[in-house]
Image (cartoon, rainbow, N blue to C red):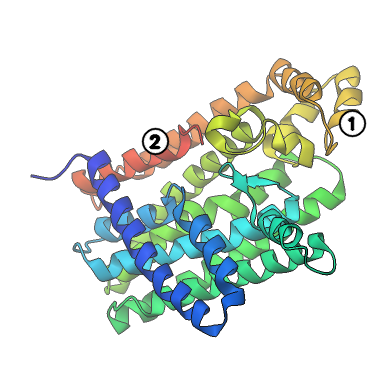
C-alpha cells in the first residue's frame, strides 16, 4: 500500500536529515584535523544546517525524481540532500547582506562569530571578523554542496545529466541575489521588478529547478525528460512565486516565536518586496509620508512596525497578496493534471505545494 503523502514526505525528510548529519560529521572531523581553530566553524555549520529547516528543496527534487519514473534509492536521497548545502550558502550570505541578527531564533552566522570574537577578546574588529567568517562559511557550504553531490554514489550517467541543471540553479540564485541588492539600491518600488526578484532569488531554486534536478536523475530518455521538465516548469514557477509571496507576508506579519526572526524584520531592513511595492502603489499621500519616514529604519520601534503593518493592511495589499498566492497555487496544481503525472505523484506534489504556501514559518 502506498503511504499517505504526508507520511511519505516525513520519511524523505528524515532520510535527508540523516544523510546531512552523516556528511557533516565527516566534514567536521576533517576540519578538526586541519586545526583546532576550525572547531567553531564546524560547530556553527553543524548547528546552522541541522537545527531546523523545512528541507523543501530536497523534497521537491526527490518528488520530481519519483514522478519522472525513478525508484526509491538511497544514493538519490544523498544527491538531493546536497541542495540543503546550496540553501545554507544562500541564507548565510543573505543574512549578511541584509544585516539580519537572527536565523531560526539563533544568531545569524556573522553575529555568531562576532560573539566569538568578543567572548575570546580577540584583536581587531568583531564586526569584520563576523563578516569575513560569514563570507567564508557561505562559500564553504557551496563547496560542500558540490562535494556531497559528487560523493553520493549515484550512477555517472545520472550525475552528468544533472550537472547542467545544478549549474543553472546556482547561476539563477546568484543572479536573483544581485537583483535583490540592486533593487534596494534603486530606492524605488516596482511590482514587476519585485516579482522578477521573487522568481529568481527564491522561487526557481526552491521549486522549479529542484524538480528539474530530480527529473534529470530519474529519466535517461531525452524526450520524456524534456516533457517532465516542461510540466514541472508550469507547476514550479507559479508555486515558487507563491512561496516567496508567503515569505513576504511572514517577514512583516510573522510570529517571531514561530519564524525565529524579529517581528517586522523586513520593515526594518527596508526589503523591497512585492508586498511593499503593492502597498506603495495603493498608499495615500499621508500613508506614503509615513512609509518614507519609517520603512527601512534599522531602529524601528514596535509601535512603528504596527503603524506600517496597519498601512499595509488598510491599503488592501496584504489581502491582494493572499489572493495572488491562492491564484498562483491553483495555476500550479492545474499543471499537474496531465496523464504523465500518476495519482501517487499528484498526491505527493499537491501535499508539498500546500506545505510550501500555507506554512507559518
What residue would you read off at disc 2? Answer: 354
Determine which of the numbered discs, if any, sits on residue 183 in the image.
none
What residue would you read off at disc 1? Answer: 292
First in sequence: mark 1 vs mark 2:
1
Does residue 163 appear anywhere in the picture? no
- C-alpha distance separating marks 1 and 2: 35 Å
Which residue is drawn at the image coordinates 42% and 34% (left, top)? 330
Which residue is drawn at the image coordinates 72% and 63% (left, top)? 120
Height in image: 23 above or below 179? below
Q: Residues within 10 Å of mark 2 (few under 14, many from 20)?
A: some
Q: Position of residue 90 (x, y in %)?
A: 60, 59
Quadrant where the image shows the N terminus: top left
State left or right for residue 174 relative to residue 291: left
Which residue is drawn at the image coordinates 52% and 78% (left, top)? 31
Q: Quadrant of residue 81?
A: bottom left
Q: Position of residue 268 (x, y in %)?
A: 78, 37
Q: Quadrant of residue 247?
A: top right
- State the residue lying farthest toward the left: 1
How many discs appear?
2
Amino acid at each position: 500500500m502506498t503511504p499517505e503523502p504526508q507520511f511519505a514526505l516525513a520519511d524523505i525528510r528524515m532520510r535527508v536529515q540523516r544523510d546531512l548529519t552523516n556528511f557533516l560529521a565527516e566534514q567536521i572531523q576533517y576540519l578538526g584535523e586541519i586545526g583546532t581553530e576550525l572547531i567553531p566553524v564546524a560547530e556553527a555549520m553543524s548547528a546552522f544546517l541541522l537545527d531546523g529547516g523545512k528541507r523543501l528543496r530536497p523534497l521537491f527534487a526527490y518528488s520530481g525524481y519519483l514522478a519522472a519514473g525513478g525508484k526509491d534509492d538511497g544514493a538519490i536521497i544523498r544527491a538531493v540532500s546536497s541542495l540543503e548545502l546550496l540553501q545554507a550558502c544562500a541564507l548565510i550570505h543573505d543574512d549578511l547582506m541584509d544585516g539580519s541578527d537572527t536565523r531560526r531564533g539563533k544568531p545569524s552566522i556573522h553575529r555568531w562569530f562576532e560573539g566569538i570574537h568578543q567572548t575570546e577578546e580577540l584583536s581587531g574588529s568583531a564586526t569584520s571578523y563576523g563578516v569575513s567568517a560569514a563570507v567564508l562559511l557561505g562559500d564553504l557550504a557551496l563547496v560542500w554542496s558540490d562535494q556531497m553531490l559528487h560523493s553520493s554514489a549515484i550512477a555517472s550517467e545520472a550525475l552528468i545529466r544533472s550537472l547542467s541543471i545544478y549549474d543553472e540553479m546556482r547561476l539563477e540564485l546568484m543572479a536573483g541575489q544581485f537583483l535583490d541588492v540592486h533593487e534596494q539600491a534603486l530606492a524605488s518600488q516596482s511590482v514587476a521588478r519585485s516579482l522578477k526578484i521573487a522568481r529568481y532569488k527564491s522561487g526557481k531554486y526552491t521549486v522549479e529547478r529542484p524538480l528539474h534536478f530530480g527529473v534529470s536523475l530519474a529519466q535517461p530518455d531525452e524526450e520524456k525528460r524534456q516533457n517532465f521538465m516542461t510540466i514541472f516548469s508550469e507547476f514550479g514557477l507559479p508555486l515558487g512565486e507563491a512561496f516567496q509571496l508567503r515569505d513576504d507576508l511572514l517577514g512583516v506579519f510573522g510570529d517571531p516565536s514561530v519564524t525565529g526572526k524579529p517581528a517586522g524584520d523586513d520593515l526594518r531592513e527596508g526589503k523591497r518586496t512585492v508586498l511593499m511595492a503593492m502597498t506603495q502603489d495603493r498608499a495615500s499621500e499621508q500613508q506614503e509620508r509615513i512609509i518614507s519616514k519609517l520603512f527601512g529604519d534599522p531602529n524601528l520601534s514596535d509601535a512603528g512596525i504596527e503603524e506600517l503593518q496597519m498601512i499595509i493592511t488598510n491599503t488592501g495589499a496584504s489581502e491582494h497578496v493572499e489572493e495572488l498566492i491562492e491564484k498562483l497555487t491553483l495555476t500550479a496544481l492545474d499543471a499537474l493534471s496531465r496523464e504523465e503525472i500518476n495519482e501517487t505523484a499528484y498526491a505527493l506534489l499537491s501535499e508539498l505545494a500546500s506545505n510550501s504556501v500555507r506554512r507559518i514559518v
